[in-house]
């Protein structure tokens, strides 16, 4: 659904790591504590962040490779190696083995295969750690010479020793962005700007009719794979500046249901899409830390403009804990029972005090019945 958290430099850090450590924890003879799980998870995130910081190119919206497929598999391998208790030498080989499974073309973005990239990264990283554990070896210098194929300006430097006083987790300085809509992160700027413009239109006329819109100009950063003027599928719609702006204008919101086939094929939406032009100003950089969206709407009565440079959920403007929990509850309740949803929330809130992390998996398997799922969907 493209709901993954997003980091800077650009990747989805959690999706490749969390499934690996949850699955691996269930197989170990001595079950890890919540703190053990949290430490392994953070190591998986840390390795991704450090690798990407060796490249300036990695800071921008990607052009060639999907980042979770490149650094995600390395994070999965590192996190799994920590849980398995591998030696430093074995950890080196785990990363080398994982690197041979890295990389997926961005051409598969906006398709059903895109989420498979993260699934493969989680799987192959875990497998790499297990292979290193039984003796498989790779190039021990893989991080020094192997990643230039993915990032043209890759220039590694020595990692800070985690036992030194100067060590600091990257997450302490660079938080993630949490999405409120199931779409590419760039869509959040567009949706916020479009909603602000709609509010201005409503103030100009009590019963403003969207049919009065003559033209819409979106000023966004250059990025080919999220410039999709007329999306035909939900996956293309999740990667379309134009679709998300028009959906926000039409419905005064963008939700999970906005990407359904029925919503996608609406004549009113298609009509509005035909009026959209995209512009890419030179000062609008393809970076989740610097980009913005300007929207200009020309009507029969005049011109309305709005701008978003930081959406709600961005690391500069993070979701409140309540809104984060509410988002999880709404999504998780489509598959988990009430006890399962509430149990997961409680365990996560107290993860450092949990004696055995298997309790988390226990709650994650408390699925609701099809009847309960249908009831919740109707009431959501």
Image: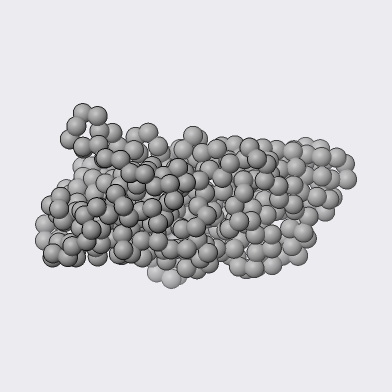
Horizontal placement of 277 versus 363: left or right? Answer: right
Q: Nearer the viewer, residue 33 or 275?
A: 275
In the image, residue 299 above or below residue 161: below
Horizontal placement of 196 versus 179: left or right? Answer: right
Horizontal placement of 301 versus 253: left or right? Answer: right
Q: Nearer the viewer, residue 138 or 235?
A: 138
Residue 178 shows up from this direction: no
Instruction: Name the residue at 46% across, 38% down.
Output: 315
Residue 299 shows up from this direction: yes
For this orientation, the residue located farthest to the bottom is: 370
Q: Nearer the viewer, residue 251 or 47?
A: 47
Residue 340, image x, y percentages = 33, 57
Residue 306, image x, y percentages = 70, 38
Q: Nearer the viewer, residue 57 or 257?
A: 57
Q: How many marks?
A: 0
Instruction: Name the residue at 58% across, 41% down.
Output: 285
Instruction: Name the residue at 50% across, 52% down.
Output: 62
Residue 151, image x, y percentages = 42, 51
Q: Quadrant of residue 263?
A: bottom right
């Amino acid at each position: 659904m493209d709901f993954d958290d997003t980091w800077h430099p650009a990747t989805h850090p959690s999706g490749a790591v969390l499934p690996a450590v949850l699955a691996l924890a269930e197989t170990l003879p001595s079950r890890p504590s919540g703190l053990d799980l949290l430490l392994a998870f953070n190591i998986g995130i840390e390795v991704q962040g450090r690798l990407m910081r060796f490249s300036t190119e990695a800071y921008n919206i990607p052009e060639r490779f999907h980042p979770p497929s490149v650094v995600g598999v390395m994070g999965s391998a590192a996190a799994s190696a920590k849980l398995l208790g591998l030696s430093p030498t074995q950890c080196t080989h785990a990363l080398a083995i994982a690197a041979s499974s890295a990389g997926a073309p961005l051409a598969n973005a906006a398709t059903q295969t895109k989420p498979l990239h993260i699934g493969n990264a989680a799987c192959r990283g875990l497998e790499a750690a297990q292979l290193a554990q039984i003796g498989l070896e790779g190039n021990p210098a893989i991080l020094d010479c192997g990643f230039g194929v993915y990032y043209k300006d890759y220039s590694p430097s020595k990692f800070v020793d985690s036992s030194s006083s100067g060590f600091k987790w990257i997450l302490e300085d660079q938080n993630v962005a949490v999405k409120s809509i199931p779409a590419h992160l760039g869509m959040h700027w567009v949706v916020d700007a479009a909603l602000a413009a709609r509010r201005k239109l409503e103030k100009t006329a009590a019963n403003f009719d969207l049919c009065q819109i003559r033209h819409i100009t979106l000023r966004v950063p250059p990025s080919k794979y999220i410039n999709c003027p007329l999306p035909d599928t939900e996956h293309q719609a999740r990667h379309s500046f134009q679709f998300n702006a028009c959906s926000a204008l039409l419905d005064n919101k963008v939700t999970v249901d906005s990407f359904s086939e029925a919503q996608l094929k609406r004549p009113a939406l298609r009509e509005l899409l035909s009026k959209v032009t995209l512009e890419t100003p030179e000062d609008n950089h393809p970076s989740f830390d610097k980009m913005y969206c300007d929207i200009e709407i020309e009507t029969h009565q005049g011109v309305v403009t709005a701008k978003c440079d930081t959406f709600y959920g961005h690391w500069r403007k993070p979701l409140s804990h309540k809104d984060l929990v509410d988002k999880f509850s709404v999504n998780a309740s489509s598959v988990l029972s009430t006890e399962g949803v509430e149990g997961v929330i409680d365990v996560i809130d107290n993860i450092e005090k949990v004696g055995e992390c298997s309790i988390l998996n226990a709650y994650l398997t408390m699925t609701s019945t099809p009847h309960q799922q249908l009831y919740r969907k109707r009431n959501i």
